Image (tube, coloured by chain):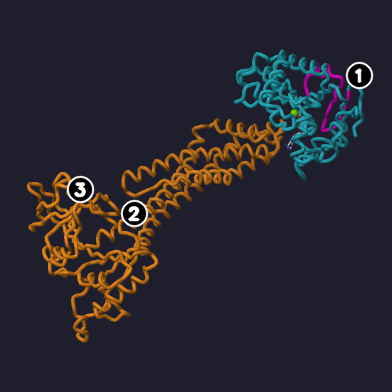
């Protein structure tokens, strides 16, 4: 097992072709160690979501390579990417993305149902989902539907869902973007707690206060890594 | 995802829009219902044909005059200038000269009032026939005897009653024997009562009175309509094997009787096969119509299902994107939506089967068409419904599976 969980080389993403082509990522070289907590900052349109989607295997780079957990995933088929997303990645979205008709516990169970290798019975899936919801402090909201939960609670359900398959990494793209200050702080505190328990986390945020708590902050500008701040000290990188 | 879990997921998706889902299945309901009724109608027709064979007796040959031949010119022999058609004498000649037959009979009908004491039955079908009738028609005497050759030779005024007639006139069959009844203005003595046979084909056997055909000729048939002419002579062969032999013997006998050229006889022989074929063709017309209805409805229903599934895929694009983000493979998504389409059409199939079974019973009860439910048509209907679901659900399901997770999540 290598120390680097994530290693990208010259990761490039171009949307569109010809005169309308947009270079969303340009030669991004990023490493994330196991157990690290990395924050990604940058102005709107700088390519943060594009990077997160590629790291989350939801999208594929135009060029460059992406090695996740020792496996080059840049050119996997759609089926293989689905497997990687299911087993190795816990994605937390800004807009929660819970299925409105399902209760909290059923939403959390979903990734287990698409994991055909764990051979868990329905009862075991349910018990695991209950445990995950208890871990995020929602043991008393198991059978509530999303519209019966506050924004902060919905995001906790989403985090429980991201944790359920014991992923290698949690990727959170502006997880507090839709939340008020107090709920935001609670969510960030929850992520820190998970980090303390050993989780590897990459989080996009606009709040410098939240980023300061990360071990490393990466600044994106125009699809490039413009600056990296490590352990409280800013480390400038020259533009490529 | 396992098949069972995908099945449950699909079911949840289906119940999102119950009313809309049900409306979509209407075409499948009609199509499947039509399949069931169609097969019931076919089976009913077959049963009716089988009944007709029973009614007429097996291995029956019908001899009918053919008037189309020119046969009355001045150059014709004396025997050829006789009255056209078939006569009672022809029947006797066949009975005496043809081997391998169970019986020969002829029929001539007249409608008359029947009176016994104070009881009058109006417009009763009076069948003039011969002694061979019960053998030819596989019809049994309950009490007394049937008409004999002597009854016909001497034109005796004797009558055999159908069981319902005996019941209405005399209360019970035994009481009828020896009684006098009046048919029209002629007095008859009752010599027998037939066993009940019921309605077969269009004939109500029990509501008729049987008398010698020679008496009908003398008393009830207007001379202008041909005197002793009979419309049809029925010949019952002993078995299927001797049919051809009997037919050629009958032809020879009648050619000799009529003195006609064997190459252009003035009569035709018909077997039941041709009668049955004619009947089968009328039911085939109705059945083909239903097959069209079934086919068109299933296709229209399938297009409806495809349409609603496409709408559903669009409405649930975000859900599809999320499922993919959580690890659903393209084929998990495909199977989920395919199963939704199949379940939708199977529900339509279930309702259609109920409607078809109900419809078959109604057809039968109303009496417009005889139907017999075919058990195999029910699984067949479900297979048809499932096939429609798979065929028309495939495109929307594949479309769902091909969605890009990022674009799907960004939808709305
Ligand atoms: N699907 C897309 N098609 C075309 N351009 C896109 C698409 N997604 C993102 N972009 C462009 O790529 C750039 C980076 O976008 P994004 O990664 O969403 O930025 P951020 O998350 O940092 O706000 C932007 O200029 C955006 O307009
Ligand atoms: Mg973004």
Q: Residue at x 30, y 59 (%)?
A: B56
> In the image as oriented, which residue stretches furthest toward the bottom?
B75
Name the quadrant containing residue A10: top right
Chain letter for mark 2: B
Q: Is residue A92 above or below residue A18?
A: above
Q: Which residues are magenta?
A: A204-228
Q: Are the residues at dot 2 and dot 1 in contact (C-beta closer than 8 Å)?
A: no
Q: Looking at the image, is mark 3 or mark 2 earlier in the sequence?
A: 2
The quarter of the picture showing ligand 1: top right
Q: Which mark is residue B51?
A: 2
Q: Is residue B202 above or below residue B15?
A: below
The residue under label 3 is B164
Name the quadrant containing residue B160: bottom left
Per the image, label 2 sits on a secondary structure element best described as: helix
Chain letter for mark 1: A
Per the model, the C-alpha gap separating discs 2 and 1 is 102 Å
The residue under label 1 is A233
Per the model, the C-alpha gap separating discs 3 and 2 is 20 Å
Per the image, label 1 sits on a secondary structure element best described as: strand
Q: Colour of chain B?
A: orange
């Amino acid at each position: 097992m290598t120390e680097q969980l994530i290693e990208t080389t010259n990761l490039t993403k171009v949307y569109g072709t010809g005169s309308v082509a947009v270079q969303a990522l340009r030669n991004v070289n990023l490493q994330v160690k196991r157990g690290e907590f990395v924050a990604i900052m940058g102005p709107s349109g700088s390519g943060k979501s594009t990077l997160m989607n590629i790291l989350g295997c939801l999208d594929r780079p135009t060029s460059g390579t992406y090695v996740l957990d020792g496996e080059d995933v840049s050119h996997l088929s759609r089926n293989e990417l689905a497997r990687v997303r299911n087993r190795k990645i816990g994605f937390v979205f800004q807009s929660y993305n819970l299925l409105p008709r399902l209760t909290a516990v059923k939403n959390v169970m979903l990734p287990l149902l698409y994991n055909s290798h764990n051979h868990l019975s329905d009862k075991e899936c349910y018990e695991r989902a209950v445990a995950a919801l208890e871990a995020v402090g929602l043991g008393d909201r198991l059978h509530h539907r999303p519209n019966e939960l506050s924004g902060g609670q919905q995001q906790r359900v989403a985090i429980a869902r991201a944790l359920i398959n014991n992923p290698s990494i949690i990727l959170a793209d502006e997880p507090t973007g839709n939340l008020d200050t107090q709920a935001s702080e609670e969510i960030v505190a929850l992520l820190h707690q998970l980090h303390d328990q050993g989780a590897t986390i990459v989080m996009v945020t606009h709040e410098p206060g939240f980023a300061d708590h990360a071990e490393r902050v990466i600044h994106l500008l125009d699809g490039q890594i413009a600056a990296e701040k490590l352990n409280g000290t800013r480390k400038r990188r020259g533009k490529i | 995802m396992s098949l069972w879990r995908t099945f449950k997921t699909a079911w949840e998706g289906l119940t999102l829009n119950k009313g809309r889902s049900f409306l979509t299945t209407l075409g499948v309901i009609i199509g499947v219902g039509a399949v069931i009724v169609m097969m019931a109608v076919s089976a009913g027709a077959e049963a009716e044909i089988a009944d007709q064979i029973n009614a007429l007796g097996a291995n029956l040959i019908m001899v009918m005059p053919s008037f189309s031949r020119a046969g009355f010119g001045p150059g014709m022999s004396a025997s050829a200038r006789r009255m056209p058609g078939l006569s009672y004498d022809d029947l006797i000649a066949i009975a005496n000269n043809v081997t391998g037959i169970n019986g020969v009979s002829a029929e001539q009908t007249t409608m008359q009032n029947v009176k016994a004491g104070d009881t009058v039955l109006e417009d009763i079908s009076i069948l003039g026939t011969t002694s061979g009738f019960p053998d030819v028609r596989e019809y049994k005497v309950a009490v007394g005897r049937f008409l004999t050759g002597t009854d016909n030779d001497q034109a005796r005024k004797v009558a055999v009653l159908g069981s319902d007639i005996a019941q209405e006139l005399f209360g019970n069959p035994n009481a009828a024997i020896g009684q006098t009844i009046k048919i029209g203005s002629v007095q008859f003595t009752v010599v027998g009562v037939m066993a009940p046979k019921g309605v077969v084909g269009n004939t109500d056997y029990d509501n008729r009175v049987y008398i010698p055909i020679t008496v009908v000729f003398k008393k009830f048939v207007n001379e202008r309509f041909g005197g002793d002419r009979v419309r049809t002579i029925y010949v019952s062969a002993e078995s299927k094997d001797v049919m051809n032999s009997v037919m050629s013997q009958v032809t020879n006998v009648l050619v000799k009787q009529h003195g006609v050229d064997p190459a252009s006889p003035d009569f035709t022989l018909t077997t039941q096969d041709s009668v049955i074929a004619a009947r089968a063709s009328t039911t085939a017309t109705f059945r083909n119509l239903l097959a069209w209805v079934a086919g068109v409805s299933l296709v229209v229903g399938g297009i409806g299902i495809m349409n609603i599934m496409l709408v559903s895929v669009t409405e649930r694009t975000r859900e599809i994107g999320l499922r993919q983000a959580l690890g659903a493979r393209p084929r998990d998504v495909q199977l989920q939506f395919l199963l939704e389409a199949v379940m939708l059409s199977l529900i339509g199939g279930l309702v259609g089967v109920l409607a078809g079974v109900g419809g078959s019973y109604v057809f039968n009860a109303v009496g417009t068409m005889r139907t017999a439910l075919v058990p195999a048509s029910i699984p067949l209907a479900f297979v048809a419904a499932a096939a429609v679901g798979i065929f028309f659900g495939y495109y929307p399901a594949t479309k769902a599976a091909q969605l890009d997770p990022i674009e799907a999540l960004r939808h709305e």
